Amino acid sequence: MSTVIITGASMGIGRALALAWADEKATLILSARGRQALDEVAAEVAARGARAVVVPGDVTDEEHRVDLVRHAVDHGGIDVLINNAGRGFYSPATKIDIQQLRDLFELNVVAPLRLVQLAAPHLERARGTVVMMSSVAGVVAAPKYAAYAASKFALEAIAMSLRSELAAVGVRVVVIRPGPVDTPFREHATRAEGMVGYDAPDPKAQPADVVARKTVRAVLRGTPVVETSNFVRVASATGRYAPSVLRFALRRMAVK
Ligand SMILES: NC(=O)c1ccc[n+]([C@@H]2O[C@H](COP(=O)([O-])OP(=O)(O)OC[C@H]3O[C@@H](n4cnc5c(N)ncnc54)[C@H](OP(=O)(O)O)[C@@H]3O)[C@@H](O)[C@H]2O)c1
């Protein structure tokens, strides 16, 4: 039976991932700052006949990261590490607060990399899988998304490099690229002063459980990159094959 670490497991995509892995009867090691919400997810996991260990803490804190890996090892090793915890950031590039940018990188970039470093020997033993929860913003930087997109581009770069390094020891790296997903993500995002955009319910928002099921399937099949919706596939392909069309569309978005 697999042991799966999920960060940001208390709500949104992370909660959906916990439930999807519970259906695979995995043992789950769940991390987020809020204990009560994590306990509720653990109860839902138990109701599906799987086991969840709750490890509350902040993934930007090294002590918590070490603790998380230790809990997983105590429960049988690490088959899958899912770096899902993350935050949005909406600001024109010229107004990005640099301390807030550093904080964002601690969560969206440094924490996933450190967890991979700490988990690597155990993943190697299990010939396991690292999952990086990226975004369409990992390949397209829309206006007011400079900070968030920079963090997800960085995560994609780490994932690409890691994939080649870890292939030799049998560890896979899976990148998931969702577009808008129906979660409280927008409410939690950092915003530049006076930034009120991107609040409306997004008609293209995908249910979190769809993203979660695609993630489980990608891990089981070893798919390197999954773009979870047509919106992401079109945006990403336009950037690659028709960059001038994408530039035109982004300029239009910027003046809206
Ligand atoms: N929703 C979208 O539209 C969308 C689209 C593309 C990609 N994504 C990516 O998907 C991932 C999950 O997003 P989501 O939509 O599920 O967001 P969410 O609903 O805001 O959930 C974020 C999760 O991360 C946890 N978290 C936040 N900061 C943390 C910290 N410092 N330490 C530990 N845990 C922390 C939160 O719990 P606590 O607050 O209790 O810590 C929560 O469980 C993120 O990486 C995001 O960038 C989301």
Image: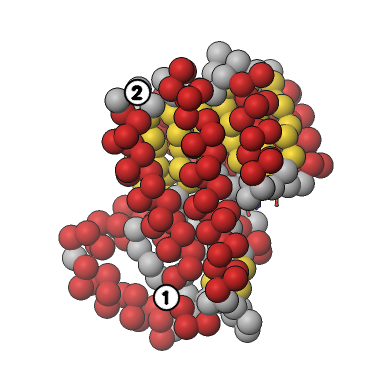
Which sits in the foreground, 177 or 29?
A: 29
Which amino acid type corresponds to the residue marked 2 in the rendered image? Val
Residue 143 position within the rendered picture, expressed as x and y whole percent measured from the top left: 42, 75
- Figure check: 145 above or below 30: below
Q: Is 239 positioned to the left or the right of 65 in the image?
A: left
Q: Nearer the viewer, mark 1 or mark 2?
A: 2
Question: Residue at point 32% right, 44% down?
Answer: 160
Q: Nearer the viewer, residue 241 or 67?
A: 67
Residue 143 numbered mark, or none: 1
Colouring chosen for the image of the structure: secondary structure
Density class for disc 1 (Cα within 10 Å; few <14, some 14-19, many ≥20) is: some
Of residues 124 and 242, the one nearer the viewer is 124
Q: Is residue 44 above or below residue 158?
A: above
What residue would you read off at disc 2?
A: 169
Q: Position of residue 2 (x, y in %)?
A: 54, 18
Q: Is mark 1 within 8 Å of ligand 1?
A: no
Mark 1 falls on what kind of element?
loop
Q: Which residue: 66% across, 64% down?
A: 187
